[in-house]
Image (cartoon, rainbow, N blue to C red):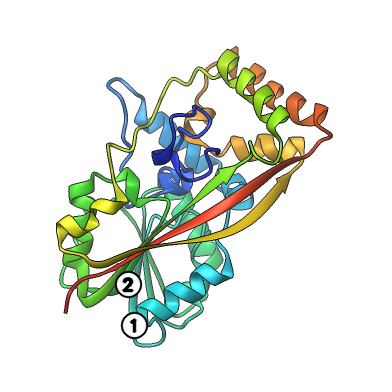
């Protein structure tokens, strides 16, 4: 596995990161995203670091497969006349397929630079709406949605708030969808994986570590949701050494590694991949959780 977007499922230090998608600060996660931090962590420093890497994030963070979106759109019945809310879109890794249905698309993004990039990318669409705010505290007034979805973001919100507030904001019969990517780079390149773990063991010394606060996707039915189901889809990605370093640099706890460790850490990652033929492969599992608010 790897950090991609499923920090909640692994104790591997390479996975224990947020998605600055999430970041809304976490690359995946994002706006409706609450940064979970340990006492004394410089949250504002991390938020600034992540939002400053918006273009890098946009280029290297994983996207989701077409089959996943086709299933989601069919399940939720999304199209013209339907209202949708995306939590922490980051730079739009999961935005286009939903926006292109012609629905009334709304998003809330905590990262200022990420929000601005979203406006630049999608502002021309008449059905696009976004606010720069925190899902936890934002007042949506009387607005209600037919679909609320999150791509590797919702797990950074305290569970009770995440499920209770989304439930309140959904129309009766509305859908909550949560997705993330689990990236496995051990299976396709085990020797390289072992070398990378050595780099982490020696130089991974982040000043800020994130925890998902015990969020459990499977707890959704406790908050009133029905018809809970999990679907999985598979794909793969390939990086050169420089691309892998750039990708790793989109994770917030990697960004704030202090010197002299930071340079040695990223140089170590680059050298490991170069020695493996300048190629690292990820086997991705895209996970989609679906559920309904009762009629």
| Residue 123 visible from this viewpoint | no
Position above or below: 212 against 69: above
Please tell me which residue is depicted at 42% across the width and 51% down the height of the picture. 152
Whole-number angstrom distance, CA of label 1 to CA of label 2? 8 Å
Please tell me which residue is depicted at 30% across the width and 20% down the height of the picture. 40
Closest to the observer: 18 or 108? 18
Q: Judge the density around disc 1: few (<14), some (14-19), many (≥20) Cα neighbours within 10 Å.
A: some
| Residue 289 visible from this viewpoint | yes
Closest to the observer: 47 or 253? 253
Q: Is residue 294 left or right of residue 214?
A: left
In contact (CB < 8 Å): disc 1 and disc 2: yes
Q: Is residue 133 left or right of residue 205?
A: left
Q: Quadrant of residue 16?
A: top left
Q: Quadrant of residue 47?
A: top left
Residue that carries the numbered disc 2 in the rendered image: 147
The single residue placed furthest to the right in the displayed view is 277
Residue that carries the numbered disc 1 in the rendered image: 82
Looking at marks 1 and 2 on the same chain, the residue that comes earlier in the sequence is marked by 1
Closest to the observer: 194 or 146? 194
Please tell me which residue is depicted at 55% across the width and 65% down the height of the picture. 121
């Amino acid at each position: 596995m790897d950090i991609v977007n499923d920090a909640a499922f692994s104790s591997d230090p390479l996975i224990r990161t947020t998605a600055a998608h999430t970041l809304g600060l976490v690359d995946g996660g994002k706006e409706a995203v609450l940064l979970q931090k340990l006492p004394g962590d410089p949250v504002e420093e991390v938020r600034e670091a992540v939002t400053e890497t918006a273009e890098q994030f946009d280029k290297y963070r994983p996207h989701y497969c077409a089959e996943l979106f086709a299933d989601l759109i069919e399940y939720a019945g999304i199209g013209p006349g339907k209202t949708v809310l995306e939590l922490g879109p980051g730079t739009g890794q999961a935005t286009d397929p939903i926006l292109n249905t012609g629905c009334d698309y709304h998003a809330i993004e905590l990262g200022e630079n990420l929000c601005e990039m979203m406006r630049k990318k999608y502002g021309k669409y008449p059905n696009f709406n976004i606010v720069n705010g925190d899902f936890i505290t934002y007042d949506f007034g009387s607005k209600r949605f037919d679909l609320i979805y999150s791509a590797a973001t919702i797990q950074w919100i305290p569970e009770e708030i995440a499920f209770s507030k989304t439930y309140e904001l959904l129309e009766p019969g509305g859908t909550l969808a949560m997705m993330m990517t689990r990236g496995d780079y051990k299976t396709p390149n085990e020797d390289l994986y072992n070398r990378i773990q050595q780099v982490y063991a020696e130089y991974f010394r982040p000043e800020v570590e994130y925890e998902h606060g015990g969020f459990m996707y499977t707890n959704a039915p406790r908050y009133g949701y029905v018809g809970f189901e999990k679907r999985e889809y598979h794909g793969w990605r390939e990086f050169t050494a420089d691309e892998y370093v750039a990708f790793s640099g989109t994770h917030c706890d990697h960004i704030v590694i202090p010197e002299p460790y930071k340079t040695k850490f990223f140089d170590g990652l680059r050298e490991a991949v170069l020695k493996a033929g300048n190629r690292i492969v990820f086997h991705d599992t895209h996970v989609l959780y679906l559920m309904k608010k009762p009629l």
